[in-house]
Image (spheres, grey):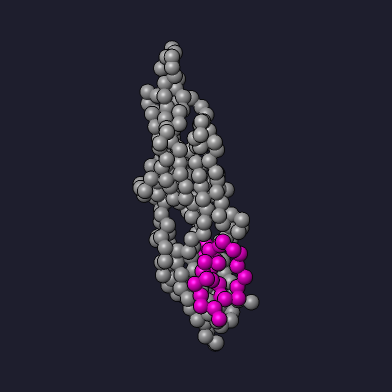
Amino acid sequence: MANTFLRRLSLPAALAVLTVAASAFGAGTAHAAEPGGPCDPRVTRSGLYEVSTAVVDPVLTHWKGITIAPGTTGSVETTVTEVQNVSTTFNASTEINSEVGAFFAKVSVKVGFSVQTSRSSTSTWSQKVTLNFSRPGDYAVFKGTNRVQGKADEYVCLPRYPPNSDPGDGYWAYSFGSHPTYSTFDAEIEGTVSCDTPVSPGTVQELARNKLVCH
C-alpha cells in the first residue's frame, strides 16, 4: 500500500458537487428568502446580500509527479507547480469589503464548512512540500481545495408606504435584476497519491491521481 499523507481530509464524495438551490419566491422568480428585521432607509439603501446558489467542486491547484527510486525512501522535499489558481471574488472583484465578507460567512453556513471571507488566493500557498515515503514508486504530490461558486441576491432597504410616523422604519425588498456572482474556497488539501492509492470519486485526490501515467 502506498504511503499517503494528507494534511487535511477531503470532503465526502457526496459533497464533491453540491448545489444549494434557490428557493422559489414571487411570481415565477427564484431568489433567496427576504432577510428579516427592520432597516432604516435613511442610512441603509443597499449592500445586503443573501446566498441564491452555491456549487462545490474539487480543484487541483498544484501538482508534480515524482519517482522515488529504491534506496532513496525517507523524507523528500519537492516544489509543486501551480496548475490552477482559485481566488475569492465577488462580482468579478477581489476587493472584499465588510458587507461582502458577511455574505461569505452566510456561504459557509450554506455549504457546511468554512470558506474564505476576505481577499485571498491559492497562489499564496507555499509551493515547497516535504513528505515521507516508505517505499519506492511513482507518486503525484499535490495541493488543492474545494471551490464554491454561485450567485447572490441583493436586497435594498425601502421606506414603507403609506408613510408612517417613523421615517426610519423600513423594510428589505428584493432587487430585481441584481445577481452578483461569487467564488471562494475551502482550506488547503495537501498530500500524495500513487497509481494504486484508493481515492473517492469527485475529490482532489482523484484529480491528482488522474494526472499520473499509470500502466
Residue visible at 41% across and 60% down? 85
Residue visible at 55% across and 87% down? 70
Image coordinates for residue 34, horizontal then vertical, percent: 51, 31
Image coordinates for residue 178, horizontal then vertical, percent: 40, 37
Query: In front here: 107 or 201?
Result: 201
Instruction: Examine the image and state in which quarter residue 110 appears.
Output: top right
Magenta range: 189-215
Residue visible at 51% across and 31% down? 27
Q: Is residue 213 magenta?
A: yes
Please identify the quadrant where the C terminus is shown. bottom right
Query: In front here: 74 or 11?
Result: 11
Depicted 97 relative to depicted 171: above or below: below
Query: In front here: 16 or 66?
Result: 16
Depicted 181 relative to depicted 121: above or below: above
Image coordinates for residue 118, horizontal then vertical, percent: 42, 48
Query: In front here: 200 or 21?
Result: 21
Please identify the quadrant where the N terminus is shown. bottom right
Can the viewer see residue 74 in this picture? no
Residue visible at 52% across and 71% down? 210
Spot the residue most to the top. 165
